[in-house]
Image: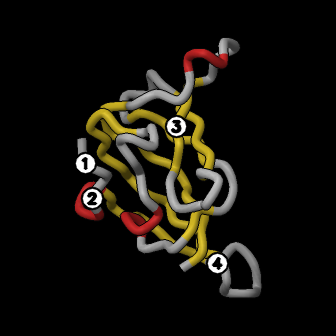
Amino acid sequence: MADLAASAVTINDSWYPGQAKQLIARECTIVLAAMGTIANGIPASAFGLSAFVGPVTLTKSDDTEIVLGTPSYDLTQLILAPQVTDIADVPLDYTGTYRGVITGRV
């Protein structure tokens, strides 16, 4: 499987969360096709970012699923996981249209 392409990301709104313009927040719609693990990556570059900063919560378009995301150790990939109690279930790949706020460095 290939990494998420920039063409699968729609940036609906962008803003700087503070006075310094080192970080940018982007409210995005993302179309995933079995993506969310390192093998099927969600790179920061698909959002026009050099690195992810902080956690992400994504909501599926039909409101049936909430997915949590965290940056990889090097901050270049977003790793997705469901809200679970069994750590053996994470990370997972997801398919569908999701919306959420992504924060990162440009």
Q: Which residue is more in the foreground, 28 or 89? A: 89
Residue at the image point whose x is 37% and y is 35% from the top: 61
Q: Name the residue under label 2.
A: 5
* Mark 1 and mark 4: Cα distance apart in space: 30 Å
Q: Which of marks 3 and 2 is nearer the N terminus?
A: 2
- The kind of secondary structure element at disc 3 is strand
**For the view shown, which residue lies furthest in the bottom direction?**
20
In percent of width and height, residue 75 lies at 60, 60
Q: Residue at x 51, y 74 (%)?
A: 50
Which residue lies under the disc numbered 3?
A: 80
Whichever of labels 2 and 4 marks the residue nearer the N terminus, that label is: 2
Q: Is residue 88 left or right of residue 36?
A: right
Task: Tell me the residue that label 1 is attached to.
Answer: 2
From the image, which quarter does the C terminus lie in?
bottom right
Q: What element carries label 2?
A: loop
Per the model, the C-alpha gap separating discs 3 and 2 is: 16 Å
Observer-nearest of 100 and 52:
52
Relative to 44, say whether 68 is above or below.
Answer: above
Compared across the picture, whether 92 is left or right of 75 comes to: left
Q: Which amino acid does label 3 sit on?
A: Leu
State if disc 2 and disc 3 touch (CB < 8 Å): no
Cα separation between marks 2 and 4: 24 Å
Query: At which x and y percent is residue 34?
Result: 30, 33
Place residue 87 in its image quadrant.
Answer: top right
First reached walking from the N terminus: tag 3 or tag 1: 1
The secondary structure type at the circle numbered 4 is loop
**How far separated are the C-alphas under marks 2 and 1?**
8 Å
Q: How many marks?
A: 4
Q: Which amino acid does label 1 sit on?
A: Ala
Give, as a three-letter code, the residue at label 4: Tyr
Q: Is mark 1 on a helix, strand or loop?
A: loop
For disc 4, the marked residue is 16
